[in-house]
Amino acid sequence: MSQVDRTRERLIETYRRRAAHYDVVSRLYPAPGYPQGSQRRRAVGELRLRPGDSVVEVACGTGLNFPLLEDAVGPRGRIVGVDLTDAMLDRARMRVRSHGWRNVALVQADAVDFRFPEGVDAILSTYALTQVPECGAVIAHGAAALAEGGRWAVLDLKAPDRTPAWLTRLGVAAVGRSAALDEWIGRRPWEAIRAAMGEELVDVSWSELCFGSAFLAAGTRAGGGRSGAGR
């Protein structure tokens, strides 16, 4: 089994265990008092969504971002939630049913293998993409499917720059990353995401949050105005 396959299996098992309590535990992620909610709202804001737009959320988990996305795209819009783990999607389905949303489709797929719908207006991933070994490829695949003027936004954790390696390992261990810690730090996936966005998108922004322990990256597919797949 390759390293990529081992990482995938570890992620599936980790999130199957966490699914039942994920919504409660996530309020303490990555640490008590961390401004996760405001960061999620900021990430959705970077998509510049309009009523009727279509948006794909990569690694949607239990659908914590769905209320924010629904508020932005409205009932005429379309949301596609993609996740690797069946148990997380089961929770997402419960959320969709409880709210009576009729414009949400859920897909179980590896982010790398997922075929993004052509002409989608926006793509989002929060607190998940750095755990995907081929995260740069996911950025590229998504960017190719975006409508002209469509937006890609990624919110995730990173190791702060200019921090001793031992302190980084201690801090990230406290957060509890599900990917192997040393492999995650050594791979520096946030750099791959930043590089891929720079290659595939224009008007790319990069903001470091919480003293460099997180980042918000966003960019636009080159072209004129959006064609508006959701309209």
Image (cartoon, rainbow, N blue to C red):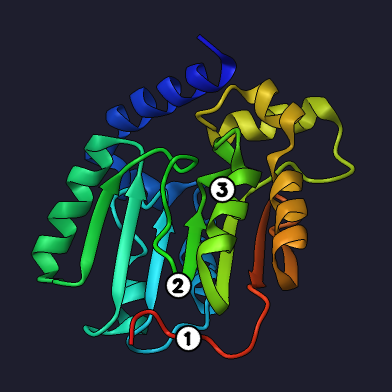
Residue 114, position as x, y percentages in the image: 41, 46
Q: Quadrant of residue 219?
A: bottom right
Q: Which residue is mark 1?
A: 227
Residue 153, position as x, y percentages in the image: 57, 65
The residue type indicated by label 3 comes to: Val
| Residue at (29% x, 27% y) in the render | 17
Q: Nearer the viewer, residue 6 or 183?
A: 6
CB of mark 3 within 8 Å of CB of mark 2? no
Asked whether residue 136 is in view, the answer is yes
Give the quarter of the figure containing the C terminus. Answer: bottom left
In the image, residue 70 sits, relative to residue 189, either above or below, namely: below
In the image, residue 136 sits, relative to residue 81, either above or below, namely: above
Q: Nearer the viewer, mark 3 or mark 2?
A: 2
Residue 10, position as x, y percentages in the image: 44, 21
Q: Which residue is mark 2?
A: 119
The residue type indicated by label 2 comes to: Gly
Say what secondary structure mark 3 lies in.
Answer: helix
Q: Nearer the viewer, residue 157 or 10?
A: 10
**Apparent side of residue 115 relative to residue 204 in the rendered image (left or right):** left
Q: Which residue is mark 3?
A: 138
| Residue at (57% x, 90% y) in the render | 225
Pointer 3 or 2: first along the chain: 2
Q: CA distance from mark 1 to mark 3?
A: 22 Å
CB of mark 1 within 8 Å of CB of mark 2? yes
Say what secondary structure mark 1 lies in.
Answer: loop
The residue type indicated by label 1 comes to: Ser
